[in-house]
Amino acid sequence: MSLLHKPFGENSCEDEKKLLLANYEKYYFRNKRFESRLLDRSTYLIVGRRGTGKSSLIEYFAFEDLHGKAYRSIDINEPELYQVVLEKVARLLQDSELHTTHKTKLIWKYVVWSLIFREYADKDDAIRVGELMDYADDHKPTPSRIILSIIQGLINKFTGIGGIEAVFDGIESRLSSTAFRRAQEAVLKHCKNDEAIIAIDSIEDYPVSNSAMMAAISALIEFAAEFSTDFAPKGLHLKVFISSEVFPHLLASVIPNPLKVVRDPLVMQWRPKELLRFVCWRWHLHLIETGRWDKNVKVDFDKPNDVLKKLWEPYFGHDLLNAAGHHEKSFAFILRHTQLRPRQLVIICNKFFSFIEETGYRSDNPSRDAARAIESVQSLLATEVINSYKKIHHHADRILNALTGLPMVFKGKELDRVARITSSQWESEEYSPYNFRTLCAELGIIGRVRTMDERSGIIAADFEYFIEDNLIITDRDDCVFHPLFFNRYNVHRNIDNAIVYPFPDHPDYEL
């Protein structure tokens, strides 16, 4: 199987795996910066927004050769099942007066070690602990289904004789038993030369109003921090993937000791040159597969400029004439209509390809074809960004409609004026002009102007999705819309011949 019809990839890792099967590793793009951090023993927490490739990075663990060595891979990467697991853990907490981080961490400890024992059960009699840990007896259940079976078993015990306190007492008894300790020792003995990585994927939507569910996720992060300290040096690695959309809420309101628990997370912020290499890697494979690539031409994928000259510009144009009347590099034009997420770029590039596929695989009018590609998917991309917050900010789509008709550049106090008309749409969050400003910044819709260059027409701006902290917008700040949302909110272009560059002021983000 291949990516003939969508040469830049499918809209999700799950779809690509179904399509490509054993060929998935061939199409996987090696981001060495992420991979080296990911395999670092101190890295246990990975944070990224929807569409940044968290699920793809989990698939990396299954490859046979990771920086010169192989790992056992235990992937909890079925979001639908994992969501059910979290909901069931939350139920255990909601029905218990023992709603403490310690008790919740016991559940995760029980679950994770159950998976580890099952993985190494054929290595040592001491690890065959069928009587010690309860898990599904299917022939080849996935890790997600095993966890679901474990949690359901706990709930069944809770609803039977003894109640929730007896369940936790039973868990503590097993985790402190001699059999458990011996099984642990046997696993760690094998891990010296046979290391394992347990990767727990994020879910799509986090209901922040469900305090028990948030507590369950917080406890998982805390457990992962402790597990990493204790066992990563011994060959057992636990990696927890969390959505950036919910991570600030966890830090601010849920995790009790963030400085202790959250230690140097890997934040999946892609750089323009990495995104260029990513889409051109896929495009190169497509050209080879269709017989359109000259085998005598070699591309150095470690040199972005070589990639740009040989794989992007010959097909998609060197520059184009943008709506402001300025000549602009074609890749920069495409990229500034994204929030630097691979999925967004894949969707735009696939659409661009559909316009040039029948004209010899080369655009004779990049100004037209690139603009058409973006216009046709812009609404879809904007909707995905907004929907990713639907359980964090209820009615976010209705609230944000207040932005409709605002000018491209405006003072921060203008947000307070339009915020007033949204007051009836706020539910779980308390309405205030400050919260409205925070929402606009958090979703990356509104940024803060950094510089305006009258000669080039470029308005350089900072957006929250690429800074390490929250973007604070004051009344006096010059604010600007992200280009991705111009059409959705019918933005009034109040500055002639201007374009917005939503990239950080950093050498790594130069195009």
Image (cartoon, rainbow, N blue to C red):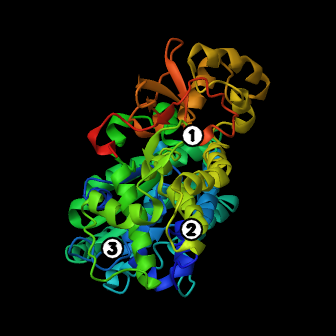
Q: Indicate which disc, 2 or 3, sits on the residue closer to the N terminus.
A: 3
Q: Indicate which disc, 1 or 2, sits on the residue closer to the N terminus.
A: 1
The amino acid type found where label 2 is placed reads Ile
Residue 273, compared with residue 495, is above or below; it is: below
Which-is-in-front pick, marks 2 and 3? Answer: 2
Q: Looking at the rendered structure, which numbered label has been put on residue 323?
A: 1
Identify the residue shown where x is 42% and y is 56%. 240
Image spot of residue 129 (x, y percent): 42, 78
- In-image side of 296 versus 160 (left or right): left
Q: Residues within 10 Å of mark 1 (few under 14, many from 20)?
A: few
Identify the residue shown where x is 36% and y is 42%. 262
Residue 407, compared with residue 59, is above or below; it is: above
Q: Nearer the viewer, residue 41 or 4?
A: 4
Q: Looking at the rendered structure, which numbered label has been put on residue 505?
A: none
Image spot of residue 493 (x, y percent): 62, 28
Residue 304 appears in the figure: yes
Q: Looking at the rendered structure, which numbered label has been put on residue 183?
A: 3
Q: Secondary structure at mark 1?
A: loop
Image spot of residue 343 (x, y percent): 52, 58
Residue 377, compared with residue 459, is above or below; it is: below
The amino acid type found where label 1 is placed reads Ala
Query: Which residue in the structure is indicated by mark 2?
Result: 356
Q: Secondary structure at mark 3?
A: helix
